[in-house]
Every structure is written in C-alpha cells, then in structure tokens.
Image: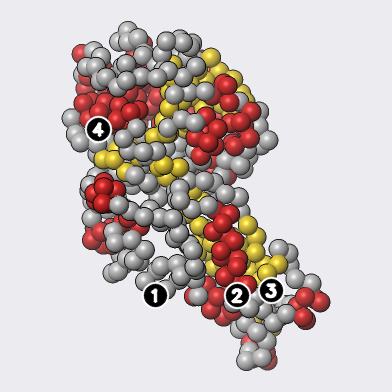
Amino acid sequence: MKKTFSLVFLSLTFSLFAQDDVAVKSQVADAINEVREFIAIPNDALDAADIDRNIMWLKRKFGDRGFNTAVLDTEGLPLFFAAMPMNANKPTVLIYMHFDGQSVDPTKWNQPDPYQVVLKKPTDSGFETISFDELDDDINYDWRLFGRSTSDDKSPIVMLLNAMDLLKNDGIEIPFNIKVILDSEEEKSSKPLPAAVKQYRELLESDFLMIVDGPVHASEKPTVVYGCRGITTLTLTTYGPIKPQHSGHYGNYAPNPGFQLSKLLATMKDDEGRVIIPGYYDGISINPKTDSILKSVPDSDETIAEKLQFKTAEQVGGYYQEALQYPSLNIRGLSSGWVGDKARTIVPESATAELDLRLVVESDGNRLKKLVKDHITKQGYKVLNHVPSKDERMHFDKIITIEEGSVTDAFRTELNNPYGEFIVKTLNQSFGEEVIQIRTMGGTVPIAPFINELKIPAFIVPVVNPDNNQHSPNENIKIGQLAYGIKTFYSILSSKME
C-alpha cells in the first residue's frame, strides 16, 4: 500500500563514520573492485547469454546485501528485481537502473579489451594508463576507470550496493522500503517494459520512482531531473534505377535518389532549424515561471557552442534548456552509394535517411510520425511500407519507403512534488551546494510505463561524470563520482519523510 505523508525534513542521520572522508574512500576502494568484477562480464544488449551471466552476478551481490531477488520473465529478455524486507509503515522507493550495454568495437578503444577495466590518470595530452597497484588509501578522485558500461549504467548499481554496506556498518535503520528494478534491454529501447510493468504491477507498487542513469550537469554539481524526452524513429528510402548505373552513361537521365531525398529533407526545416511541418510544436507553451526555472540551470550557450565548435545554434528555443522543451526532428544518418576511397562514378539505386524524433510530454510520437508522413505525401511521394515492385516503380515518379520505429514516451514530474523536494533538500544538506534542477533532459529513459501504470512521480538522480563517453569508445567513470554516488544513495536512503 502507498503511504501519504506530509513533508517534514528531519535532520540527516549520518553517523560520523559515514561522513568521514577516509571511510568513504575505503568504501570506494571496495566499489572499484566490484566495478572491475562487474564490467568483466560482457553485457551486450543483443546477446541473451551475456544478460543471463549478468543476472547471476546480480543475484549473488544483492543477495549478499540482504535483498530478496527475482528474475522477471518478459516478452524479451528478463528483468532483474530485488527488494529489502517490506514494512507496511514505511514509504516505498522504486529504483530503476539498467545493466545492459551498447555493443563495442574493440579497435576503437585505447585499451586491449573494453570489458577489462583499466585505470587512467589525466595528463596534459589526455589520459595515461597506470597500474591498479598505484591505488592506495589516499585514492585520487580525478583518476578514472575505463570500460564499457562503467558509467552507463553498471557503476551506479555498484554505488547502491556499497551504500547499502555503509548503511549496515553504521547501523542505520532505513526509513524506506527499497525495491530495485534493473532493465536488460534499455539499450534496445526497452520494448518489453510496458507489458512487463503491467504484468508485475503489484510487485512494483511504490510511492515514488528514482531513476539513476545518465550524467550530472556539466558543472558537476548535484543534479535532479524531473523529466526526459521520449523517442521514436523513421527510416526513409528513396529510389533511382533498379541497380547502380554508370554516371557517365545515365547521369542527367536516370533519377538520382540522393537528390530526391535531400530536397525532401530540406522541406522539413527552415534555415534556422525550426520544423516547419504544420502542427509539429502544437500544445507547447512556456510561462514566465517555467522560463525562470529553465534559466536557473547554469548553462552557457557560448561555452556549449565553443565545445561543439559551431558558430550559431538552431533557433527552436532561445537558449539550450528552452530548446529541450520542444520535440526534435533529427537526421541521425544518411546513406547513398559509396564515399571516400570507395567512391564510385555511379547513379545510386537508393538513398536512405534515418530520423529520430525526440518527444516531450505535450507531443505524441505516433501523431508526429503521421505529420511527417503526411508532409511527405504532400510533396508528391507515393508512400510505401515495403520495397517497391517493378509495377510500382513504373507507375509512380516519386516513391519512398517509410519504416516506423516504436515509441518511447516522454515523462515529466511537477517541480513542486513533495518527493522531489525531499530529494533536493537531502542532497543540498548532504553536499552543501544548491542542487541544479532540470525540468527536462535531452536523453531518453524508458520510464513512462512505470508512471502510466503505477501512477507515481519519477525523478532522475544522475551520478556519473558528464564527460563519460557513454555509448562511445573509451567510456569511463571518474573515481570521485563513485564516492559521490555512494554518498547520494546513503543520504537519500538514511533520511526520513513523515
């Protein structure tokens, strides 16, 4: 049963031991060892055997901390669930993380094996690999651990486990029931999750949801995020001759699918980056209070532009945080013929554009996809969901195949929610800094099924460094962030709401 509480912040119950930096560093040393052990189990989201081996590790580690565990079957790969013994008089927090990872190309990594963690220290020219033997009692928080999923999202799981160790060592009676749900297909858009949440609704019932995924704000200050964008995708393919043709013989004659596609894409946005498909931004308004909250985030548009090395940002919003409040239309990939050393003098047979549409709460992914498809039809295209036949090729001048991806909805919790206020004040007291509150972050976490089914507020509490290279070669976690994450979990799970 959910509990209704008036919000009363009691003094944090940190013991002197838990607040002592030496003790925290001692726990960090244990966490480093556990991160190395966990990363050594490959976790490619495309490999079911990888997922099974990770689940075995999780069952053992959570069981060692007193959790009851279960493997929840889904329409796809299983979820991992853990819970501490329940007390009907306590509110329940559900913690979401994921343990699957992106695929790796080992040739792009600056280490022999992305699944064997290496220790590196920063230098003037980048990072230098050093031996783990150099770690001592005075751990350097600027050193980093490099390996796939060190930041996204295995280290946060290890942070929770080690926070539980500290809480036990300090004799803290945790004022919450704790449930943990770990996703095995987050990097594959978590397609089984909506049905699984509905199936296991009673098991997952909670008072609020805490998502521990993604990086803290670029300032590296404590951060709480109240929402994130959703996502859906479209694949567009235009057609020329049935096979690539010699451009000397058939250039100026056979229609070129690359030009067709580029002209089509150019009709979707204006010169300043705004989507000009009618209705794309419908329902979105930003009032003065929201504008003030967005501007309180300490971003610098000039710094972002310099870092990314472009002169002028697109003008969907007047500044970075405002831009994130609107749905996007992004070309994430283009392909036609060959390029570089493999370039050929041909008229290609087809051209393909991969689009992703980032969603906000006010936008519906299926509606936006329909708007895009209707717009393409108005440009004179025959829209198909399959490769055109010869008869179709001979009948229509402009043909396009559109493949639709699934929809992951956006979510957003009100900034004045009592549980959010509790998390913010707890972190403020723990770290002695004003917490950065972000209304909507740019990335996507598949949380909407929990909100829609369980009817609970959700908050993202990121713990990893912003320059972690998640999804990319040389992914890493700063050792200082291990300490930050452990203390974050400790402070929230040892503080009381009444």
Q: CA distance from mark 3 to mark 4?
A: 61 Å
Residue at the image position 34 percent from the left and 44 percent from the top: 439
Q: Which residue is mark 1?
A: 271
Of 424 and 331, the residue lying toward us:
424
Q: Which mark is residue 382?
A: 3
Give the CA distance from mark 2 to mark 1: 20 Å
Name the front one of labels 2 and 1.
Answer: 2
Relative to 300, say whether 491 is above or below.
above
Give the residue displayed 45% in from the left and 36% down from the top: 153
> x, y percentage for residue 27?
32, 21
- SS category of the residue bearing label 1: loop
Residue at 41 percent of width and 67 percent of height: 274
Q: Amino acid at mark 2?
A: Lys
In the rendered image, residue 183, in percent from the top left (x then y), is placed at 54, 33
Q: Nearer the viewer, residue 289 or 223?
A: 289
Q: Which residue is mark 4?
A: 140
Q: Nearer the viewer, mark 3 or mark 2?
A: 2
Amino acid type of the residue tagged 1 in the rendering: Asp
